[in-house]
Amino acid sequence: MELRDFLIRIKIGTTFGIKKQSQIYQTVRDQPELSISEWVHTSPLIADEQRSDLVNYLHS
């Protein structure tokens, strides 16, 4: 998945507020060596209970 697509899905498909969206954008942009999937699985910005739902949504 391209970064652009990931960020659009975060924006329209989640309940994250603008502050969380901005933090996600900054973190993903600063870690280009990680794939989106790796980032989602390891990010402290995503709560454990949200992680599986987000992964399923991103792969749909």
Image (tube, rainbow, N blue to C red):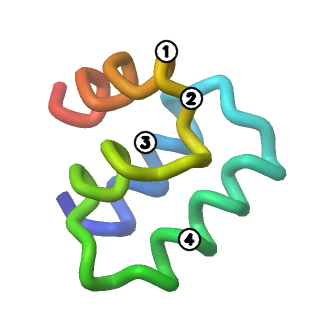
Instruction: Give the structural element (helix, strand or loop) at label 1.
Output: helix
| Circle 3: residue type | Arg
Label pair 4/3, CB-CB below 8 angstroms: no
The vertical placement of 29 against 49, above or below, is below
| Circle 4: residue type | Thr
Residue identified by numbered label 3: 9
**Mark 1 or mark 3: which is in front?**
1
- C-alpha span from label 1 to label 2: 5 Å
**Mark 3 or mark 2: which is in front?**
2
Image coords of residue 39 (percent x, y): 34, 57
Residue identified by numbered label 2: 47
- C-alpha span from label 4 to label 3: 16 Å
The vertical placement of 7 against 53, above or below, is below
Label pair 1/2, CB-CB below 8 angstroms: yes
In the shown orientation, is residue 36 left or right of residue 40?
Answer: left
The residue lying at 36 percent from left, 47 percent from top is 40
Label pair 4/1, CB-CB below 8 angstroms: no
Image coords of residue 18 (percent x, y): 80, 47
In the shown orientation, is residue 17 left or right of residue 3?
Answer: right
Instruction: Give the structural element (helix, strand or loop) at label 4.
Output: helix
**Mark 4 or mark 2: which is in front?**
2
The vertical placement of 26 against 8, above or below, is below
**Mark 4 or mark 3: which is in front?**
4
Rate crowding at label 4 as few (under 14), some (14 to 19) or many (20 or more) other CA atoms within 10 Å: some
| Circle 1: residue type | Glu
In the shown orientation, is residue 22 left or right of residue 4?
Answer: right
Residue identified by numbered label 4: 27
Whichever of labels 4 and 2 marks the residue nearer the N terminus, that label is 4
Rate crowding at label 3 as few (under 14), some (14 to 19) or many (20 or more) other CA atoms within 10 Å: some
Image coords of residue 44 (percent x, y): 56, 48
- C-alpha span from label 4 to label 2: 15 Å
Residue identified by numbered label 1: 49
